[in-house]
Image: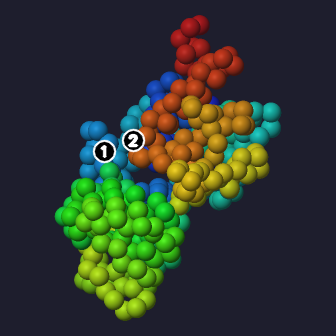
């Protein structure tokens, strides 16, 4: 790869948003390069859920199939991380950590985010397996288990209320969350949710299975799954030179993570740069990220058409 290589679109990120965008663009006869660092946010998960037609598919398998489909329409791939993106009058240069560079007329940023997890031994090791966050993504897989909710904010009460739908055995560990008021305690008691005061010291793992939650006091409460509230931090360092920075995202007064600010179709404040997936929406699931990638790709193609830029194949067919 050299500076002489120029694509209509370089897609940065090979997860659901990036691959769906690349597929849409390749089918639009655009020259597309996907630069993929191979670090999808959902890599630890055993399967992708609520994705119609691919329910339960392993993330790696979903992405392998997606790559094959894109390649069938002429899309290209390079494995590697992007160090920086620079812009000279709408002619973007993408420099990889390896030192290789490539040029692009437009950029689709689909780099996702990195989950900040509670600093409790066992949480990161079991993340995506029996330590989880989304009841709709993982609730069925842990149904009827003893489920512990590791409270780190006021939103953890909502987590406990939700997971009660999947199990009659739910325990809220107050950990570092604000103290519960009488109304919250009464609500949880009415739902049959147990509340355990104190700071969690570690998760108990035996024979590669989560078996319990250990408190600083030494008390161990049996648990077959633990719910946490991660804070996804958008991967945007490579576009900092363009003036793009992530901002905190709130829901119900709780900081849920960081993401770029985009318009409804993924457009950023930098002309020629779109963003889709968790880098632009901390709440996006896999299928929502894929949809956002399609939307952003359609707008990118429209922008190129409005600029009078058509594919060589389309130009040749008209001549």
| 2 or 1: tag closer to the N-terminus | 1
Query: Element under label 1?
Result: loop
User: Residue at the location (46% across, 46% down)?
Assistant: 284
Name the residue that disc number 1 marks. Answer: 50
Does the CB distance between marks 2 and 1 fall below 8 Å? yes
In the depicted structure, whether residue 134 falls above or below residue 244: below
Can the viewer see residue 154 in this picture? yes
The image shows residue 270 at horizontal and vertical percentages of 72, 37
User: Residue at the location (60% across, 28% down)?
Assistant: 300
Q: Identify the image quadrant of residue 169.
A: bottom left
Q: Residue 166 or 290: which is nearer the viewer?
A: 166
The image shows residue 144 at horizontal and vertical percentages of 19, 64
Outermost right residue: 89
The image shows residue 116 at horizontal and vertical percentages of 53, 66
In the depicted structure, whether residue 214 falls above or below residue 133: below
* Cα–Cα gap, marks 2 and 1: 7 Å
Q: Residue 234 or 30: which is nearer the viewer?
A: 234
Name the residue that disc number 2 marks. Answer: 287
Q: Residue 295 or 105: which is nearer the viewer?
A: 295
User: Residue at the location (76% across, 45% down)?
Assistant: 242
Query: Element under label 2?
Result: helix
User: Residue at the location (57% across, 57% down)?
Assistant: 255
Outermost top residue: 319
Q: Identify the image quadrant of residue 226.
A: bottom left
Q: Residues within 10 Å of mark 1 (few under 14, many from 20)?
A: some
The image shows residue 91 at horizontal and vertical percentages of 74, 35
């Amino acid at each position: 790869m050299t500076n002489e290589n120029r694509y209509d679109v370089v897609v940065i990120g090979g997860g659901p948003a990036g691959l769906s965008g690349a597929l849409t663009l390749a089918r639009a006869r655009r020259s597309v390069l996907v630069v993929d660092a191979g670090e999808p946010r959902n890599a630890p998960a055993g399967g992708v859920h609520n994705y119609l037609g691919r329910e339960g598919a392993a993330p790696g398998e979903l992405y392998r199939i997606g790559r094959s489909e894109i390649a069938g329409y002429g899309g290209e791939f390079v494995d590697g991380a992007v160090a920086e993106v620079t812009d000279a009058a709408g002619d973007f240069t993408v420099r990889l950590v390896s030192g290789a560079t490539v040029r692009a007329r437009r950029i689709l940023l689909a780099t996702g985010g990195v989950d900040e997890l509670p600093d409790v031994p066992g949480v990161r090791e079991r993340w995506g397996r029996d330590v989880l966050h989304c009841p709709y993504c993982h609730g069925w897989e842990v149904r009827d288990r003893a489920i512990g909710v590791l409270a780190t904010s006021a939103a953890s009460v909502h987590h406990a209320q939700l997971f009660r739908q999947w199990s009659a055995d739910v325990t809220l560990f107050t950990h570092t969350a604000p103290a519960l008021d009488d109304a919250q305690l009464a609500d949880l008691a009415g739902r049959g949710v147990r509340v355990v005061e104190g700071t969690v010291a570690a998760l108990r793992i035996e024979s590669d299975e989560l078996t319990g939650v250990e408190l600083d006091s030494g008390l161990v409460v049996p648990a077959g799954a633990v719910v946490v509230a991660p804070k996804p931090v958008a991967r945007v360092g490579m576009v900092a030179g363009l003036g793009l920075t992530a901002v905190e995202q709130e829901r119900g007064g709780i900081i849920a993570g960081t993401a770029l600010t985009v318009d409804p179709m993924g457009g950023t404040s930098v002309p020629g740069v779109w963003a889709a997936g968790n880098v632009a929406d901390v709440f996006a699931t896999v299928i929502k990220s894929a949809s956002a990638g399609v939307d952003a790709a359609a707008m990118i193609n429209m922008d190129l058409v409005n600029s009078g830029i058509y594919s060589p194949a389309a130009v040749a067919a008209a001549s």
